[in-house]
Image (tube, helix red, strand yellow):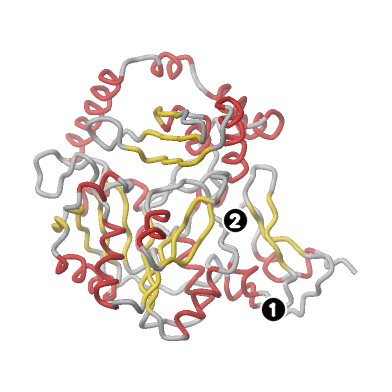
Amino acid sequence: METALKEIPILKRINSEQCCGCEACVSVCPTKVLEMKMGKEGFYYPTTVPTNKCIDCKQCVKSCPLLNSKNRKTIDVYYAGYSKDEGLVLNSSSGGIFSELIYALSDKFHQDYAFVGVVWNTTFTGTEYMIGSCESDLARIRRSKYIQARKKSVYLDTKKLLAEGHNVVFCGCPCEVAALYNVLGKEFDNLYTIDLVCQGPSSPKAMKQYVERIEKKARGRVTALNMRYVHSQEWIPKWIDIHFDNRKRILKFFDETDIGRCLHIMQRKSCYSCNFIGSNHKADITIGDYHGAIKGETYYNRMGTSIVIVNTEKGRKMLDCLVNRGNTVMIEGDKDYIKSHNPRICSTWEESSARKDFVINFEEHGLHVAAQKSWSIRERILHRMPLSYRNMKKKVKQFLIGEQTR
């Protein structure tokens, strides 16, 4: 007999607009009555498996970070810096600090450690979590992907490693780190967590459509995809760099691609009211891009600068390991200045006025039509302007913002 939606405890408490897609409820369900299914916008939501029966254990409710989360933040200290390894910085989203944290902790734990993060799937049409332990795994995890990742069994796999005594570094979006702690049910001394300054991921369905379209145009298969390629003299604005098996290549401003446009307009609904910003980060350390970094300052690297926010005592020890390793430039930053240039630290991205029409076009005609119809005439003109003009315009805007905050 089909299990009615109203019989499932978590589905009575959380609706689709609230659900952050962390997959914790699906992970812990003992009878597997829940599974993740894609909605019209291309995001995944928990729904029922008709052949399985709910036993009303309420494990799904207990695991939900939106309904149950404990405060872990006891410190609020901001740092800025970068890796001294230029190649690492170039292959990272900003200053290479995530990788340097992994290296520092691996030195401390020697071989008894693993790290968890997000990688592209084999077709570059979506992302998923993986547990890694070597340099090639780390190379796949570093860099931002901007597409909501599938979690599947990663929380339970992490719990097993921790219970066996292994040291684990888990990196994810703030809601996913919060979900991990709920699934674990207790603190583990051998768990070290990192979350991100997050603006909200975009749709896996949109990513799949984007890749399918560019592969059709290129008449080849994607073999490498980087949404944070450093192409100009500075790491911002970001470029997308895509390679195909027939040696063709796409290199352009990420924000001007169909998938870049989608990211700016169609986040998951719950991301507009995120519960895990400001003082509600659950991770030991929060990392992100340092927008507003000032040239000439000690922490500044033109190829990428990171911010590091220490949230817990364990996070402070992680930072000490990083600094003691000696391969980074890291100084304490001005908290108010950093926040003013990185608003996603403390506030969510407001829902775009263009979102409703974008979603209608996306559902009816697909990503490309939705993206193309969303551009204003002014934006279309700007896309035709030379790079030097755009960079100058951005610098003037940053300067004016900086003057207002002083």
Say if 59 sits above or below 235 in the image.
below
State which quadrant residue 238 falls in.
top left
Mark 2, secondary structure of its residue: loop
Chain-order first, disc 1 or disc 2: 2
Label 2 near label 1: C-beta < 8 Å?
Answer: no
Q: Nearer the viewer, mark 1 or mark 2?
A: 1
Q: Please report the residue visible at 21 percent of the width from the left and 30 percent of the height from the top.
A: 400
State which quadrant residue 241 falls in.
top left
Say if 324 sits above or below 119 in the image.
below
Q: Please report the residue visible at 22 percent of the width from the left and 28 percent of the height from the top.
A: 395
Image quarter in which the C terminus is found: top left
Q: Give the amino acid at mark 1.
A: Pro
Q: Give the amino acid at mark 2.
A: Gln
Which residue is nearer to you in this view: 168 or 112?
112
Q: Which residue is mark 1?
A: 30
Image quarter in which the N terminus is found: bottom right
Furthest-right residue in this view: 1
Q: Position of residue 79 (x, y in %)?
A: 20, 57
Relative placement, left or right, of 40 versus 53 is left
Q: Position of residue 183 (x, y in %)?
A: 54, 75
Which residue is nearer to you in this view: 375 or 144?
144
Q: Please report the residue visible at 51 percent of the width from the left and 31 percent of the height from the top.
A: 246
Q: Position of residue 365 (x, y in %)?
A: 69, 28
Mark 2 Cα-neighbour bin, 10 Å: few <14, some 14–19, many ≥20? some
Relative placement, left or right, of 340 versus 194 is left
- Which mark is on residue 18? 2
Using the numbered discs, state the Cα–Cα distance from disc 1 to disc 2 in whole angstroms: 23 Å
- Which mark is on residue 388? none
Q: Position of residue 205 (x, y in %)?
A: 62, 43
Mark 1, secondary structure of its residue: loop
Furthest-bottom residue in this view: 164
Furthest-front residue in this view: 246
